[in-house]
Amino acid sequence: MKLLNRFHDEYLHFFQCKTIKTISICLLFFANSAIAQTAADFILYNGKVITVDQQFRVVQAIAITGDKILATGTNQEMLRLKTKATELIDLKGKTVIPGLIDNHAHFIRSPEHMELRLDGVLYRKQAIQMIQEAVAKAKSNDWVITIGGWSKTQFLDDPRGFDLAELDQISKNIPIVIQEVYLRTYLNSVAIEKLNLNENTPDPRGGKILKTSTGKLSGIVEGAGGVAFIAEKLPLPNPQEWQENVKQYTKYLNRLGITSWYDAGGRGLDERHYQAYQALVDQGKLTVRAFYTTMRSPSTPQDVDKTLLEVTTQKPFQGNDFFDNIGWGESLYGPASTTLLKNDYKVQQQHMEQVRRMIRAIATRGLALNAHVEMENAIDAYLDEYEALHKEIPIKGLRWSFSHVDQITPQQIQRMKKLGIAVGLHTRPIIQGELMQDVHNEHSKTMPPFRLVQDSGITWGLGSDATAVTTANPFFNLDFAVTGRMVNGKKINYQSVTREEALIAHTRNNAQFLFQENNLGSLQPGKYADLLILNKDYLTVPLKEIRNLYPIATMVAGKFVFKQ
């Protein structure tokens, strides 16, 4: 009754306003009074809270109730919201940013194996030591596996891979499989034996099993097809082990500062991958948000026939704000897909006919679509198909997007704007930059074109495409977008944006790719309390130190899921 009487008094106070100016003041009074009725569970104060709202406000404190942000403002304003039950956290000057969102990653696949990651390792000597340590900790039935995320060009001391004799010396009992990007996989002898490879094993499509001059297996399988061939043969965990892997992997993402991501699917995914995550959702134990699209990548017209049947039954948005299917992506038709480390893609009409069939079905169903396109001629070909379709079935408003677009032009950006297509740019040159130079020469310096896209005004977001082709660490993404530096420190990209622009792209802008812009991406009242407390200030550290930032605490939905 007291609350009703208070509400009645404030209601009368509001209608006593005589002018527009006083109405504005009264509205503010009414809103603040309503906030005051809610007690804060947490108040983080005495810090530097970068809200990443539309004004990019920086405030001292933030109040949280339940899983949502209650208010942001000065220390004095927020501390008024405390009760005896409120937990006060003195930030002692530390910086708070929204949880980082990756707009294109393959994390759902990652818990297939508890990998040894070589992300950011600068010395081959250190990598060898890490493999040795992993072998020493391994149990008899374990494998030591790395599925990409590194390139030998990142090693400053000895830029080469791993040969058979070297890996055999490390272990004759534990199988070792070290995949380098999508270029090649290195194996020791016990891995070769367990994978049933021999001198008579035929080369996989798109790959080559390398042999010595005497015809013996060299322990190296080359090419993207070869990499996939090996990856598909690796043993998978049982359901219980898989679920435990997901727990451990999401903790890893929490430590990195990733609180949400768009998952683009990938090789070999099936219901087991999603069930492992769904089980944690059902238990209320998933500590990071995953929004995924269905990916099938048909490679023949007959495969497209089967895929179209699935499109007609696709029913997204049946999950919740932790785990949900949001549409379709990323490879519409395998033969019509470009590859970053090749520059020989030719548009073929028979392939675009299959793309046409796919996009028509997806648009008819009213689904969101993300498409993998990289090279200029491929972007043109896809836009031609999209524009023709749009005349019959409007796609503007369906939130279609292109991923990668490394060679996009200003003219193509204008065409995309008319169709309402957003752009996802990704930091694959962090480890592949020197390899890209060999293929694309001078053009590689503007791949991806961060500055061009930022200045164009088109909606864009910053992501990784992790884990096979780059590191998962979001601070490496921010560093690369701002400095253009590879892991090894070499400047490779000359399309840098400011650190503020990069942060917006990795938070508020990326929320739109997830259909979560009203819930995520900035620290504003009513949005989920997903945030990071950083070791240093993102806005003031020297540019070269952005990659060294990390969260000392990560909060998701008003709960700390990681504390250092």
Image (cartoon, grey):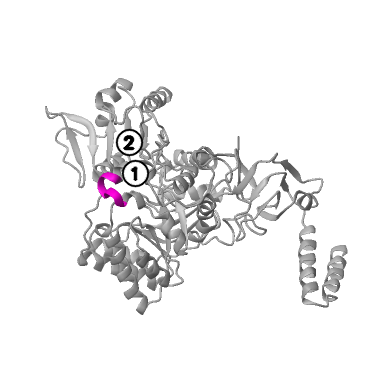
Residue 69 in the image: above or below residue 22:
above
The answer to which of 61 and 66 lies nearer the viewer is 61
- Give the percent coordinates (x, y) of residue 551: 58, 40
Circle 1: is it few (<14), some (14-19), or many (20+) Cα within 10 Å? Answer: many
Q: Could you tell me which quadrant the N terminus lies in?
A: bottom right
The answer to which of 563 and 284 lies nearer the viewer is 563
Report how many numbered discs are placed on residues in the image: 2
Please give the residue where the numbered disc 2 appears in the rendered image. 153
* Residue 382 covered by magenta stretch: no
Dot 2: what SS?
helix
| Residue stretch rendered in magenta on the structure | 437-443
> Which residue shows up at 35% across the image and 67% down it?
411
> Which residue shows up at 28% across the image and 33% down it?
186
Q: Is residue 396 left or right of residue 234?
A: right
Between the residue at mark 2 and the residue at mark 1, the CA separation in whole angstroms equals 9 Å
Residue 450 in the image: above or below residue 314:
above
Q: Can residue 366 be seen in this snapshot?
A: no
- Give the percent coordinates (x, y) of residue 358: 32, 67
* Residue 441 covered by magenta stretch: yes
Please give the residue where the numbered disc 1 appears in the rendered image. 433
